[in-house]
Image: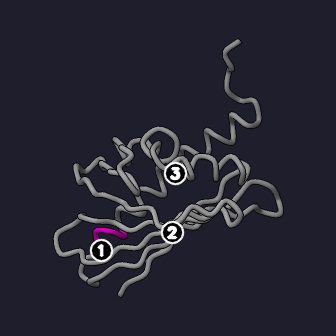
């Protein structure tokens, strides 16, 4: 089994970041637009379409508001993938803002390369989105009356 972890730091508050993450049907609009092109809620989880055309069903294992942690698994994915378990957790930073840690366990090891590359691309998309969120929190975006 191969494990990956990617980390994103942001000036956005942990509450605002968690609000975007826990909105499980809005990956494509609130968390990783461009990396994910569509998210549909299905019984017990979501159907996720990625920019590379891959579509997977992600059963949601848990949404823990106290820990600010979301856990899911995946059905489908790259050829040969037999196991994917993902978790993302938000931590407040002492200096302000937050730290997001996204972890995944993958089987077989041969499937790890493509998944790792996708996680890096997802972390880049998340970083961009959270930068905008932080700007909005500081009043950097024009608001409608």
Magenta span contains residue 95: no
Q: Main secondary structure of the magenta part?
A: helix
Left or right: where 63 falls relative to 96: left
For the residue pair 31 and 141, the one nearer the viewer reads as 31
Residue name at image x 40 percent, y 55 percent: 45
Secondary element at tag 2? strand
Characterize the local packing of mark 1: few (<14), some (14-19) or many (20 or more) Cα atoms within 10 angstroms.
few
Q: Is residue 33 above or below residue 76?
A: above
- Residue linked to disc 2: 87
The residue carrying mark 1 is 113
Quadrant for the N terminus, please: bottom left
Q: Residue furthest right?
A: 94
Which of the two discs, 3 and 2, labels the residue nearer the N terminus?
2
User: Farthest residue toward the bottom?
Assistant: 1
Instruction: Please report the bounds of the magenta region as a residue range.
Output: 112-116
Q: Tell me the SS state at disc 3.
A: helix
Graded by Cα atoms within 10 Å as few (under 14), some (14 to 19) or many (20 or more), the crowding at tag 3 reads many
State the scheme by which the image is colored: one colour
Mark nearest the camera among 3 and 2 is 2
In three-dimensional space, the C-alpha distance between marks 1 and 3, rounded to whole angstroms, equals: 20 Å
**Is 93 positioned to the left or the right of 128 in the image?**
right
Which is nearer the N-term, disc 1 or disc 2? 2
Q: Position of residue 49 (x, y in %)?
A: 30, 48
How far from the left and from the top, in percent, is residue 96?
A: 80, 55
**In front: label 1 or label 2:** 2
**Where is mark 3, residue-wise?**
126
């Amino acid at each position: 089994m191969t494990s990956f972890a990617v980390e994103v730091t942001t000036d956005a508050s942990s509450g605002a970041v968690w609000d975007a993450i826990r909105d499980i049907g809005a990956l494509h609009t609130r968390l990783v637009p461009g990396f994910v092109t569509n998210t549909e809620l299905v019984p017990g989880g979501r159907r996720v379409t990625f920019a590379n055309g891959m579509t997977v069903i992600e059963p949601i294992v848990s949404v823990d508001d106290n820990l600010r942690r979301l856990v899911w698994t995946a059905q489908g994915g790259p050829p040969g993938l037999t196991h994917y378990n993902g978790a993302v957790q938000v931590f407040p930073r002492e200096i302000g803002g937050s730290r997001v840690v996204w972890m995944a366990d993958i089987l077989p090891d041969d499937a790890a390369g493509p998944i790792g590359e996708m996680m890096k691309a997802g972390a880049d998309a998340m970083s961009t989105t959270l930068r905008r969120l932080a700007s909005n929190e500081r009043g950097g975006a024009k608001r409608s009356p």
